[in-house]
Amino acid sequence: LLAAVKMSYNVDSPNEMVVDTDDYVGVANAPEKDSVAIINPDGLDQGDSDQQLQDLPLANDYEAMRELVLPPLLDEPKILEDAHNTWTVENWRSMGKREHGPIFQAGGYPWRILLFPHGNNTDQCSIYLEHGFEADAVPDNWSACVQFALVLWNPNDPSLYVHHAAHHRFTKEEGDWG
């Protein structure tokens, strides 16, 4: 599992308050009106499809994955830290219903992966980024705005992976997202 994390704050704020990146997500230098392309699967060339697959990065190429899965932010806020964490999961089938990865630091805060290997009210694996504070030690007014991606890949073949990217304001009351 890989968690790529971007943390930002508003440099114009007198108290350097963390900003919600919802205001910044978008496509850099995008035209005002995007054109619409109609894709006909019958017209696709298998060679083009194979080339596109070859162009995808391997999951363990962290920089390339960051470029692939984390969209650019408009009016890019100051990034406190770019970080990644990898948790190698052993004995998947013997794991419990709810598992936590090891705690890692990013942006000055503790984080960890929350994993439901057999699903969280679903039949599929569920993965979340969660603050790593002890339950009784989360500061009352704590918050962190984070753009992150969760990547699940086969360690024997890092070309086989799935990913999910999100941005979220983590708080004491809402400490996980995925």
Image: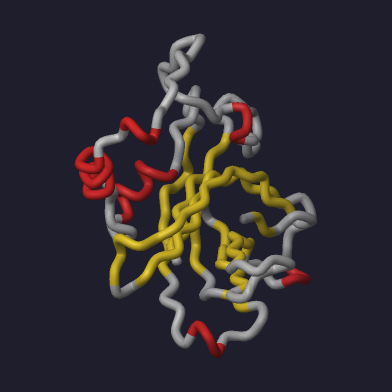
Query: Is residue 83 toward the left or the right of residue 102 in the image?
Result: left
x and y percentages locating residue 40 in the rendered image: 40, 29
Query: Is residue 136 toward the left or the right of residue 105 in the image?
Result: right
Q: What residue is rendered at 62% in x and 55% in y?
A: 178
Furthest residue in direction bottom, as rendered: 94
Q: What residue is rendered at 51% in x and 26% in y?
A: 26
x and y percentages locating residue 73 in the rendered image: 48, 30
Query: Is residue 137 toward the left or the right of residue 162 in the image?
Result: right
Residue 157 drawn above or below residue 141? below
Quadrant of the image occupied by residue 60: bottom left
Residue 84 drawn above or below residue 28? below
Q: How many marks?
A: 0
Between 89 and 108, which is closer to the camera in this rendering?
89
x and y percentages locating residue 2 in the rendered image: 43, 62
Query: Is residue 48 toward the left or the right of residue 42 in the image?
Result: left
Furthest residue in direction top, as rendered: 32
Between 129 and 18, which is closer to the camera in this rendering?
129
Residue 72 drawn above or below residue 132? above
Point out the image quarter for the N terminus.
bottom left
Q: What residue is rendered at 54% in x and 30% in y?
A: 25
Between 125 and 78, which is closer to the camera in this rendering?
125
Between 96 and 112, which is closer to the camera in this rendering?
96
x and y percentages locating residue 17 in the rendered image: 65, 37
Quadrant of the image occupied by residue 70: top left
Q: In this figure, which colouring scheme has been used for the structure? A: secondary structure
Residue 170 drawn above or below residue 19? below
Q: What residue is rendered at 47% in x and 28% in y?
A: 76
